[in-house]
Amino acid sequence: MRSTASILAAVLVLTVEASVRFTEPVWRPDLGIAVPALANAQEEPLELPKAGTFLLTDDRGGRCLEDRFDAFDLWVSQTMRGRWRDADGNVLYIARLTTRPPMDAPGTVRTRTDFLARLAKRPFDPDNAAHRNEAVVAVAPADLGQPIRPRRSQRRNMKELFAYPSTNDHVFAAAFRPRSPERRETTDWYLVILEAAEGEALDEAFRRLDEDFLDHVYVPAARARTKSLDAGYGRTSLGQEAILLREAVRRSVANYDHWHFAATEDVVVIDNLDDSSRATFVTSLTNSLPCLRRAYAACAPTPLPATNQLAVVRVFATREEYLAYVGVKHKWTAALWDTLHRELVLYLPLDGTKGLLQTVWHEAFHQYLAYAAALVTSAPWFNEGNAEMFEHSSLDRKGKVVFERHAEAAAYVQSYAADLAAILPSFLSLDYAEFYDGTQDEITARYHLAWSLAYFLEVGAPDVRFQPFANTRRDYVKALIDTRSTADADRMVFNEELRKQFIAAWLDFWKRQ
């Protein structure tokens, strides 16, 4: 194992050049210090904590949803403040050590409010070495050993500095406490980790970390600092959990130069788009999504309160960045609702923002329905059909949703209406594996048919005599919550009599179009 003390030595005689370079230090209010970043590197998004949703019932029988998150994930997302990866594969991590890791057993889930209340009962003492060490070891992405003082631990810009050896020769870590210009002001502990790429000249790479990063960290005088990012966003009707979520999303990109954060009352957007794309897309998104979300609630009403409160949208500038984030299993997607992390994820297509807004409207319905149905999976025709209907809608000048005809889908359904009516009983029972199976043309045909069902329920059903389907969508969402089963909800709402009536009315509607 390489000695980290020798890595942080002042002078090394080297014959091999490393690709690792650092930028000039930049004041970052979220960190509270000025630090360099990895040069020629991409700012990698920090993942939001994994979430689970619980359906709670009070003494009076009232029900509500409560998101709970892996306690350790919550702590890491609060502690890790940045990650940069350069073209050669070198990765730089920066963490701010202000709290101790939770005492919870692995897999424990908590609300954000409960998590913070418990952390407050275990204060972090910056002068306690044990507190520092347990935080360093817990947040580091590699196994670290006991700290040692490097040969040049005494530096003008550092109050304290410790190196942490790693079992991985390519990983080097240092915890540091910068010296403040104001003598009475205490500073936090920070952790920097450089994970060198394969093929790097390791001694040279970590000498650069020593000389070009650690030697250039500084705390500006108070008069040189900008306003803290901890300021609120004014008055809001959001609940405490939503406020904490919004702050967590902001912090996940706060130390990046090319990522941006925008928030309205019930929508949060983070993106790394260029100024031109952001000016058109983000403004349109934050203006339109609240209108769409009200329409979602009217389309698929839910008995649960506060299920339409806050949308989180992450937008990547390129497809490559999007795929790096969502993983290869989603390489066929253009956007997705990530249930585990509670966010909509998408990217800017090559043709720009044209059509991107409609893609968000589609995925945002999936987000709404997930909460409306207490994360019980709905039938794909209902989920995808309504999402398609909203994707092909528009907003009038008053912000009201207008449901447009999807020309391609309508033409397909009208051409084969009778044949499609014959397969509707089995189509309504398809699961997601069956819905997405087959060729692209077969999948597209299923999307068209699903759209036609949703469009009929929205536009055609109100004109059916006695309106037998007036409450079908509301009853279906409620049945999903009550039964916790897609199949049981389907049987409860679409009994044999209503199913026959529904298919006949659907066929009559499309024959008349």
Image (cartoon, grey):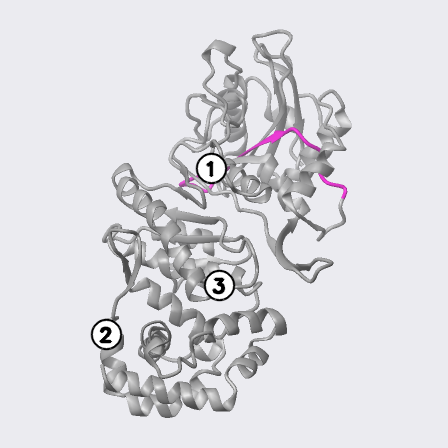
Q: Secondary structure at mark 2?
A: helix
**Between marks 2 and 1, how big is the CA–CA gap?**
40 Å
Residue 408, label in figure: 2
Residue 369, label in figure: 3
The residue positioned 60% from the left and 53% from the top of the image is 51
Q: Amino acid at mark 2?
A: Glu
Decide: few, some or many residues near mark 2? Use Cα within 10 Å; few <14, some 14-19, many ≥20. few
Image mark count: 3
Decide: few, some or many residues near mark 3? Use Cα within 10 Å; few <14, some 14-19, many ≥20. many
Name which of mark 2 and mark 1 comes first in the sequence. 1
Give the foreground label among 3 and 2: 3
Residue 413 horizontal side relative to residue 143, left or right? left
Residue 253, label in figure: 1
Name which of mark 3 and mark 2 comes first in the sequence. 3
Residue 48, given in percent of the width and then of the height, sits at: 54, 46
Q: Amino acid at mark 1?
A: Val
